[in-house]
Image: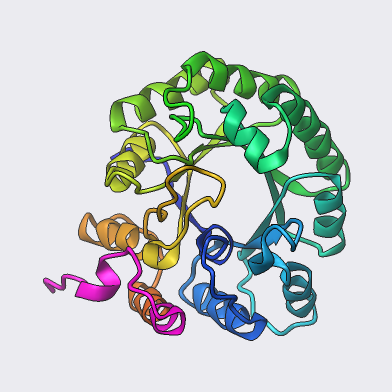
Amino acid sequence: MNNTKVILHDVGLRDGLQSISKIVDTDTKLKWLQKLIDANVRYIQVGSFVNPKVLPQMADTDEIFMRINNGEVRKNSDTILTALILNEKGMERAINSKVDKILMGVSASETHSLKNTKMSVDEATNRIIEIAKQCRAEGFEIQVSVQSAFGCGFEGKIETQKVLSIVEKYVQNGINNISLADTAGHANPLAVESMFKRILNLDSDVELACHFHNTYGMGMLNVLAAINSGVKFIESSFGGIGGCPFTKVPAGNVCTEDIVHYFNREVIPNGINLNQLIELSKDAANYLELELPGYVYKTGAINWN
């Protein structure tokens, strides 16, 4: 295991819920957010500033941040609340909502890019870079991503150089917090290690993040490969819920409590309360009337004390 300090970034309230058909009411989202904070998850993705007609599950993101800013949520001193944007209108909403960190990205797949943003990869890349610069000029912390970085459900293999060319444009524009998202779940550990190491060869100061979907059961292996390659931020979701609605085979994220359980078994310090995460996932499963993809919330943790 790489000695780099790893930070979990729970994306359940956004990427987890966006593909769930049952609309989760705002009060419940705020309750789940508070449970994540109380479990000492530092980075939490609260929602996305997108067209509510396209993603009605995210229609209340502005209201959620308004209520957060009004003090309805008790944040820890090191809590970072993040949100996703796709365009300039989303940027304005995120800025007005005083988001701690603004996330945005580009798909390396032309088909996925057109389905997700109605733009080509080049168009989306240029636009996102300009938006990122504006967010930074306003004093906001940012993260950019490359989606479908390890393959596409529509196009199949994505050439490594296509991903690296997007990363190079980010770096050339002074953007150094970069996530690779395995939107279709096609990644494998060797490809993960190779890709992240090549990025670090481009610029050793880049702060890396990863986002894996468990479509083919490779998610946890890919997380470990990413950590061993120097990745700092691991994006995961409570209960393992999730899935991009604009990819061919939507599937859940790697489960936050499963990763925390692994860290605890390996005596890797993380400061997260696993029992509270398990209770959150049980609550979410009951509310959604679904069996979530995660494991540990169903089996309980191994305790060899």
Q: Quadrant of residue 176?
A: top right
Q: Quadrant of residue 37?
A: bottom right
Foreground pick, 286 / 64: 286
| Visual colour scheme | rainbow
Q: Report the span colored magenta.
A: 283-305
Asked if residue 297 is among those painted magenta in the image, a careful observer would answer yes
Query: Compared with residue 113, is residue 286 higher up or lower down, i.e. above or below?
Result: below
Residue at 40% x, 52% y is: 251
Foreground pick, 285 / 36: 285
Query: Compared with residue 181, is residue 251 higher up or lower down, i.e. above or below?
Result: below
Q: Position of residue 188 (x, y in %)?
A: 31, 32
Query: Going by the image, does 120 lie left or right of 212?
Result: right
Q: Quadrant of residue 145?
A: top right
Foreground pick, 61 / 5: 61
Give the mark count. 0
Q: Position of residue 183 (x, y in %)?
A: 48, 41
Query: Going by the image, does 302 lie left or right of 27?
Result: left
Residue farthest left in this picture: 304
Query: Going by the image, does 169 lie left or right of 257?
Result: right
Foreground pick, 151 / 261: 151
- Which of the image's four quarters has the C terminus? bottom left
The answer to whether residue 106 is visible is no
Residue at 87% x, 53% y is: 92
Residue at 47% x, 42% y is: 248
Q: Position of residue 270 (x, y in %)?
A: 39, 60
- Which of the image's four quarters has the N terminus? top left
